[in-house]
Each structure stands twice: as structure tokens, then as C-alpha cells.
């Protein structure tokens, strides 16, 4: 059973960088051919896919996020992260780490609320 757990600060100031980490257990993030994504849900909005890192370390981002997003990983800890720079209150959302690419996901973390506010 694959389990994912998000961690990181729940409050970020505008213009700063949002940093979250996902710890994966029950499966390796380097196992072919799985992708590992970050998605979010803002108040009153649907799910929004942000980007993924593949089993081989390749990354791919939603175009609207590409300029300010990175998804690094630490294979020794079986973790991958989200770094979203220059945040605004519009980035306030529940952030989820999931297994899957840009369209479908089979395992989810419980989600973590991130609020952007001064």
C-alpha cells in the first residue's frame, strides 16, 4: 500500500516561496514508470494540476506554473518537493501530493492547507 504525506508551513507571506515536501512509503519514487505530482484545490475551484516528476527525474509543469515552479526530489529519503515562488493570495489552497501524471491519480496524500497572507 503506497502512502503519501505532505509536510510544510501552513502560512506563507506574499512574494515568498512556498515549499512543501511529500514523503512516500510503501513504494519507491524511482520505480518505473510512475510519475509523482502536485495538485491543489483553491476555495470554490476544482482540482488544478501543477506539475510532476517522473521516476527518472524528468519534470513537466502546467504552462501557467512553469516559470515559478520546481519539483526536486531526494531519492535517499524517498521524497519529492514543491517549490512555488513569488506567491500571491491566489495561491492559497489545499495542496496534495499524488501518484500519477497530469490526468489521473491513484494514491493521494491527505492534503495540506497553505494560506498566503501577510
Image: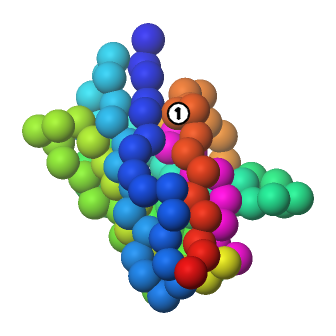
| Residue found farthest to the front | 118
- Seen in the picture, residue 102 relative to 83 is either above or below; the reply is above
Residue tagged 1: 109
User: In which quadrant of the rendered view does residue 44 lie?
Assistant: bottom right
- Residue at disc 1, secondary structure: loop
- Seen in the picture, residue 53 relative to 104 is either above or below; the reply is below
- The colour scheme of the drawn protein is rainbow
Provide residue 5's location: percent of width, then percent of height.
43, 33
Identify the residue at horizontal 44%, vertical 41% (top origin): 6
Provide residue 28's location: percent of width, then percent of height.
27, 28
Q: Which residues are magenta?
A: 90-98
| Residue found farthest to the right | 44
Provide residue 62's location: percent of width, then percent of height.
58, 70
Asked whether the viewer can see residue 39, the reply is no
Q: Nearer the viewer, residue 2 or 44?
A: 44
- Seen in the picture, residue 27 relative to 78 is either above or below; the reply is above
Describe residue 39's horizontal placement relative to residue 16 as left or right.
right
Identify the residue at horizontal 61%, vertical 36% (top origin): 105
Identify the residue at horizontal 67%, vertical 59% (top origin): 93
Q: Decide whether the magenta segment is chiefly helix, strand or loop.
A: strand
92 part of magenta stretch: yes
Provide residue 64's location: percent of width, then percent of height.
62, 80
31 part of magenta stretch: no
The N terminus: image quadrant: top left
Identify the residue at horizontal 43%, vertical 30% (top origin): 4
Amino acid at each position: 500500500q503506497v502512502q503519501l504525506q505532505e509536510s510544510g508551513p501552513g502560512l506563507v507571506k506574499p512574494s515568498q516561496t512556498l515549499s512543501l515536501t511529500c514523503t512516500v512509503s510503501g513504494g519507491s519514487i524511482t520505480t518505473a514508470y510512475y510519475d509523482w505530482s502536485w495538485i491543489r484545490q483553491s476555495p470554490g475551484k476544482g482540482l488544478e494540476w501543477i506539475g510532476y516528476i517522473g521516476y527518472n527525474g524528468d519534470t513537466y509543469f502546467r504552462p501557467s506554473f512553469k516559470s515559478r515552479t520546481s519539483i526536486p526530489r531526494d531519492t535517499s529519503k524517498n521524497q519529492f518537493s514543491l517549490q512555488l515562488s513569488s506567491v500571491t493570495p491566489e495561491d492559497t489552497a489545499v495542496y496534495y501530493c499524488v501518484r500519477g501524471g497530469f490526468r489521473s491519480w491513484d494514491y493521494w496524500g491527505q492534503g495540506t492547507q497553505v494560506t498566503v497572507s501577510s
